[in-house]
Amino acid sequence: MSLVFIASVILWIAGKRRYSTYLILSSGLGGLFNLGLKWLFQRERPDIFPIITEQGYSFPSGHSMGAFILYVSLAVVLAKISRYLLIDIIIGIMFGVLIITIGISRIYLGVHYPSDVLAGFSAGGLWVTICGLALNYYELRTEQYVPNYKRKLKKVKRYIT
């Protein structure tokens, strides 16, 4: 949560208050969504030679879901404020590798089944989609929506032709 706090403060100071709020709400409410899913499924953790011991239920993986929500939400915000498509691609790849690494580490440590991690990614993807649609709806309603991708694609076409 410290990364959410730091990024949100930076965005708030930079005058990007809606993105700061988006990051806080998507991550915070996503954590509550994860707790609700764990309560609903109540799946026990694997007990086959775990490297570390974790408490609580296993399904879906909170670390995998939280990482997916945080880094994809952060990538969405950075893509909205970035001016260059190349930066968006680099950030997307870096965050994608980080998310996958976190998921694999949960399986390696023996605290989650692979299905827990995949469910965490899936639930996180659903949550980020809902939050992203809400952000776009808010921007359209308040006339703050700027389709950056058109400007970025024009720059790419200039370099290609």
Image (cartoon, helix red, strand yellow):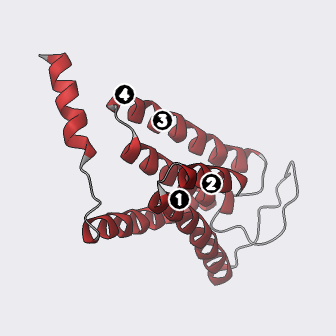
In the displayed structure, 24 sits above or below 29; it is: above
Marks 1 and 2, Cα distance to the nearest angstrom? Answer: 7 Å
Which amino acid does the dot numbered 2 rest on?
A: Val
CB within 8 Å, label 1 to label 2: yes
**Which of the 4 quarters of the picture holds residue 5?**
bottom right
Based on the displayed image, in which of its 4 quarters is residue 38 positioned? bottom right
Vertical comparison of 37 with 15: above or below: below
Q: Nearer the viewer, mark 1 or mark 4?
A: 1
- Identify the disc placed on residue 73: none
Give the mark nearer the N terminus: 2 vs 3: 2
Question: Could you tell whether 103 is left or right of 153 in the image?
Answer: right
Residue under label 4: 86
Determine the image quadrant of residue 101.
top right
Q: Which mark is residue 9?
A: 2
Q: Nearer the viewer, residue 69 or 74?
A: 74
| Residue occupying the point 71% across, 67% down | 58
Contact flag, marks 2 and 4 (Cβ < 8 Å): no
Residue 114 seen in the current view: no
Question: From the image, which quarter does the N terminus lie in?
Answer: bottom right
Q: Which residue is mark 3?
A: 91
Work out whether mark 3 precedes mark 1 in sequence or the reverse, and give the earlier one: 1
Q: Measuring 62% from the left and 66% from the top, which residue is drawn there?
A: 60
- Give the mark, 4 or 3, whose residue is nearer the N terminus: 4
Task: Tell me, yes or no, if residue 102 can be seen here.
Answer: yes
